[in-house]
Image (cartoon, helix red, strand yellow):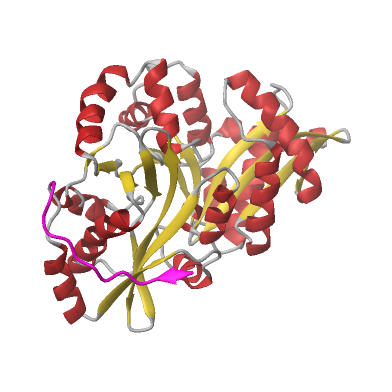
Amino acid sequence: MATADNSVTSQTNGQPNVQSFSSAAAEAGYDIRLSLDLPDPGWDAFLKKTPTTLHYQSSVWAQTKAAVGWRSARLIASQGDDIVAGAQMLFRSIPLVGNVAYISRAPVFAVEDPLLMDFVIARLHVAASTLRLKFLLVQPPCRGDAVAKHLPSHGFQPSMVEVAPKATMLVDLTRDHDVLLSRMTKRTRQYLRSGERKGIIIRKGSEADLPAFYQMLQATADRQKWSVYDYSYYTTMWRFLSPNQNARLTMAEYEGQVISALLSYQLGETVYGKTYVRQENNNLGEREMLVWESLRWAKSAGYHYYDFGRIYPKVGRELVSGERSIGSLRKRTALFKVRMGSEVTFCPEAYYYIYNPLLRKTYQTLYPRVERTRLGKRITKLIRGYNE
């Protein structure tokens, strides 16, 4: 169901007076509500027209996350009959803490109006009160620097925990196919030709391929020390996202056997090439072929960007500056993305607000001391769940 919330709060704990923004926003014709609807087709339709949006914000993604214990709510701002801004938050209860929530790659705005930004951010605190949140983590979208600049004035502080990458790699799909190929390294183009000569077949996957995908996911996770959800999570994800064209599985076969796969998510103007998995390490060139097929499909489908996902900010800075001092897996993974023609993109950092004063003091005192320890990693995992 959807609920309207028109209450206001006075300035407390660094929060500005919501009334001042509400009055100005009302004069500008803005209205706001808190929606608990699942699915929420009006919100999802708005997201598809908003350039900076990723799948994290869709209500169908919220349905997927519900399978692993997350509840959702959307703060939706309208002007007349049109949605103009908003943010979806996912929240759940943590023992001894209470409800914690995160907002990934939002708030999103159809127009860059400072009043609207202040109005929406101020009302996040009202929504937090309604949902009885103790902790709220907000990470604005890429190209959302204007949004990030408004958060501190509403009491939010920079966070050491992130829920979306602060550095990523993008391919501009508005370029011609020949240009996309020319931006790849010579070695990458050789892998593409070599894979074709070897008879590697690249095809679109279906629900019938999920067992093979999951088996390779587990194998890849074991090699690289990941944690993965149960198989039921991926079947639930597919059931919700695939009919809406928000997920795509691309498979690679060699000599009649599936050897690797690429799972991507898409919404708005961006395809997010999230999860590459394979049976074992090899040099067949199927990874390059999978990515190239995914790039070509994304371009033909009208998307503007292909997002390779997270790289470590330090690695990104080194790539931009031309340094070559890091020889770790992190750097090698980033270099593969560079060889595919992508460019480093830096995104706003995350910000947090803790509504319980004792919890706020404890977090600010304890977390910096244990951030890199096993306890710190456990705290991070509790706050954000698994890294999407």
* Above or below 25: residue 372: above
* Secondary structure, magenta segment, majority class: loop
- Seen at 42% across and 36% down, the residue is 94
Q: Does the stretch in magenta take in 296?
A: no
Label count reads 0
User: From the viewer's perspective, is 305 left or right of 231?
Assistant: left
Instruction: Residue 65: give x, y in percent of width and height.
Output: 55, 48
User: From the viewer's perspective, is 317 left or right of 62?
Assistant: left
| Image-quadrant location for residue 33 | bottom left
Residue 311, visible in the rendered structure = no
Instruction: Residue 170: give x, y in percent of width and height.
Output: 45, 45
User: From the viewer's perspective, is 127 left or right of 171?
Assistant: left
Residue 213, visible in the rendered structure = yes
* Above or below 45: residue 125: above
Task: Report the residue that reaches farthest toward the bottom.
Answer: 80
Between 194 and 371, the one nearer to me in the picture = 371
Instruction: Residue 124: give x, y in percent of width and height.
Output: 28, 57
- Seen at 64% across and 50% down, the residue is 237
Task: Report the residue that reaches farthest toward the right.
Answer: 256
* Above or below 67: residue 382: above
User: From the viewer's perspective, is 174 left or right of 299?
Assistant: left
Between 176 and 363, the one nearer to me in the picture = 363
- Seen at 56% across and 59% down, the residue is 60
- Seen at 72% across and 22% down, the residue is 280
- The range drawn in magenta is 1-13
Between 322 and 129, the one nearer to me in the picture = 129
Instruction: Residue 135: give x, y in percent of width and height.
Output: 31, 42
| Image-quadrant location for residue 316 | top left
